[in-house]
Amino acid sequence: MLPVPLQRPSGTSAVLAGAIPDAIVRGTGLVQERTGTALDIFGEHSVIGGFLTGNNRRVVDDFVDRCHEHIDIRIVPPDRDRFGRVPVNAKLAIESHVAMIGCDCGVNSSDLDKLSAIGAEIHKDYNLTMLNEVVDRVCAKMALRMIDVAVKENLVPKNSSIGFTGRAAISGRKPEYILDGIIERNLFDTPNDHLVFVDDGLARGASLMGRCMNSLGKPKNPIGGVRGGPCIMKPADQNR
């Protein structure tokens, strides 16, 4: 939970996430056209091939920019009832002072096929190392663009922490590139102390909440909640 200013009491997101890298790799023909994923090719780690530099790095940046021409990341406008593949009530979110940050590709995923065409071009003209580097940097740039929107909405104070979960943020070299981008933005004095990358944020969060509901979180030693604040659940026995 993050302390946020009164004009934006809370924030949430509606994002395509893993659908973006999946669309890129489906153009290669190396995975199933409709159900294949980036993990089918790369697994949880990057292709071993070292960092790309010089001309190759410029090629990577060009492909990343071309992909992001089709990726739309912003506060979901009030006239939208769907953003990406996610049904939303954007008007209600705005009325409730909730900053709903969305990630789409085209309009309601209409441009995913364009990402597949870029993936096909990479596979035809280069190799898996190049493809993997593009995927990692496309996903890292997605995360950083979402953070930029949150910063613009005053949702990232100096005492906040940012958590990342899911394969679109934690696989391959994505955490490294995301950290580099946050350092460049100078959001925190000690960025490593304000970032966490977890395999399954939903499951881990549910586990911590379960522990709190069983009174294992105490006001002086809280599990979860605002940093430096009391436990998010009132313990049954305040003296424990």
Image: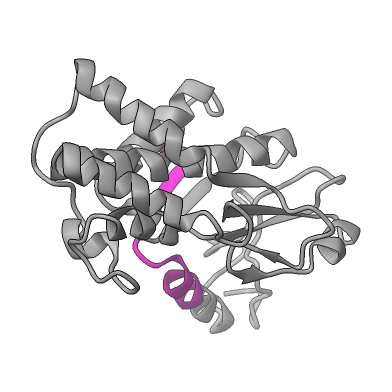
Q: Give the residue at x 18% y 47%.
A: 46
**Quarter-of-image position of residue 95:** bottom right
Q: Please state the horizontal and vertical placement of residue 85, each as a whole percent of the image.
A: 58, 68
Q: Give the residue at x 28% y 25%.
A: 59
For the N terminus, give its image quadrant: bottom right
Viewer-proximal residue, 238 or 113? 113
* Magenta stretch bounds: 192-208
Viewer-proximal residue, 186 or 85? 85
For the C terminus, give its image quadrant: bottom right
Q: Please state the horizontal and vertical placement of residue 37, each as a whole percent of the image.
A: 29, 65
Location of residue 45 with respect to 86 vertically, above or below:
above
Q: Please say whether residue 175 is visible from this viewpoint.
A: yes
Residue 222 lies in magenta, yes or no?
no
Residue 195 lies in magenta, yes or no?
yes
Q: Please say whether residue 194 is visible from this viewpoint.
A: no
Location of residue 3 with respect to 218 vertically, above or below:
above
Q: What color scheme is it?
A: one colour
Location of residue 64 with respect to 208 vertically, above or below:
above
Q: Please state the horizontal and vertical placement of residue 175, each as a whole percent of the image.
A: 34, 43
Q: Give the residue at x 61% y 48%.
A: 228
Viewer-proximal residue, 58 or 158? 58
User: Looking at this rendering, what residue extends furthest in the right direction?
Assistant: 95
Left or right of 52, for residue 178:
right
Left or right of 15, for residue 164:
left
